[in-house]
Amino acid sequence: MNFWYAGALLLSLLAPPASAQITIGNTAVDTSTVIGGIDIPWEIVWGPDNHIWMTERYGRISRVNPQTGQQSVLLTLSDCYATGESGLLGMALYPNFTDTSWVFFAYTYQQSGQIRGRLVRYTYDSSAQSLVNPLVLINNIPGNTTHNGARLLFLPDNTLLMTTGDAQNQQAPLNPVLLPGKVLRLHTDGSIPANNPTPGSYVYTLGHRNAQGMFQHPNGRIYISEHGPSSDDELNIVAPGRNYGWPTVNGMCNTPAELQYCFANNVYEPIRTWTPTIAPAGMIWYNHPALPVFQNKIILTTLKDARLYVLTLNGAGDTITSETQYLNQMFGRLRDVIADPDGNLYLATNGNSWVNSEPFTHRIVKLSPRQSSSVAEHKQPTASVFPNPLVPESRLRVDASLIGSTARLMDLHGRLLHQFEVTEEENQLNFQALQPGIYYLQLPKLRTSIKLVVLR
């Protein structure tokens, strides 16, 4: 069977194995790749359909089958502006998603040469496997190539919280009129709740630099992880109407000027700071017995530090009593973490550099309790294309386990050019329609994409 694409397998000798058995603390853990070859997964959410819902920063929203790694693309944004750390960022599913299938997400776009942020609501059409009926909830939020925040969280009253970064404008976080550097609260139609701290304002808290992690503890407290400058990354408790000090206060109130400002302006100090900085990102509260090393603790992913931080809270939930670090550099930068109902963990990796020098090489890694049988007995699928650089006789060879899967041909900008079902172990390729350049081919369960090189 002929296919309209061509490629060459991109391998990294330094990359961790697709599956392995490791020990975290005293807990034996199996690790495996759910899906590879994706491009900066920023948010992962466990859906009520038992799939992983995922945003990729260049503008794609997908559902991923955690058993097979099969990716179903629901939407690729045409107006998403992704450069530096901007692009498609946070996502949340409506709490009563089974009855009202709303999907909320935030992304950056360009307007008159300026970067702006937008919060939108779409409806999931399960029959068409797509997101439809867009509604803009908040528009024209000042953005930047960095410091866009954009983590989302639903509260029990079905109002939505959204973090915004300072967009590199240090005049904004403490200005209650401006949206950057805040935690915002709104209704699902974009209206402002009447019981917000300031009537008629989305602003729930102010004085933030760049909060990229947020969860609600069973005790009701809301926690956010926040990037500091050259020092003092923070873990904060969100309390409505409170001031978190940035940029006048960096970390704790511990200089004479900071102490004076904090006393006069109701500043809420962080419960944990990190210097040197670790670039904290997504986090969850884990309370499942499946992985005892994490049970009843905060699991925090980090980018710069490229490891998991596991934090223990005191009974009141206002003090960190212990901290342990795991997976040091094992999977590169870690952007987000979720747990499924069985207690398995899933990590979204972000490569080895924030500049994304190797697109479509990121993945979702699963951590699960070690099974009696070895992970090594369950061979990870492989694929290769030869020869490369490409010639008319180039062929794709795949493991039999990949037959029946969908292959997706992407350009360097993440645009889908072609997709097809793989039906044979070895296939003759036809790449005549491709222009000279580099492309990427995605196949489920591969650790990385196949890099396609076309010469003329």
Image (cartoon, grey):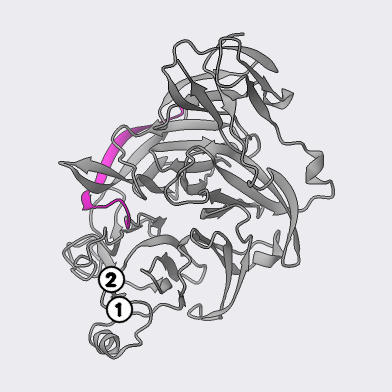
For the point 18% across and 66% down, the residue is 199
Q: Amino acid at mark 1?
A: Val
Mark 2 belongs to which amino acid?
Gly
Say which quadrant the N terminus sits in.
Answer: top right
Q: Secondary structure at mark 1?
A: loop
Circles 1, 2 touching at the beta carbon (< 8 Å): yes
**Range of the magenta residues?**
128-147
Q: Quadrant of the C terminus?
A: top left
Is 189 magenta? The answer is no
Residue 145 % position (x, y): 30, 51
Q: Nearer the viewer, residue 162 or 376?
A: 376
Residue at the far right in the pictured view: 372
Q: Which mark is residue 342?
A: none
Residue 134 shown in magenta: yes
Where does label 1 land, which residue?
249
Q: Quadrant of residue 288?
A: bottom right
Q: In the rendered image, which quarter is residue 183 located in?
A: bottom left
Q: Nearer the viewer, residue 171 or 162?
A: 171
Residue 231 on image: x %, y %: 40, 73
Q: Which residue is nearer to you in this view: 65 or 332?
A: 332
The residue sitting at 66% across, 38% down in the picture is 67
Secondary structure beneath dot 2 equals loop
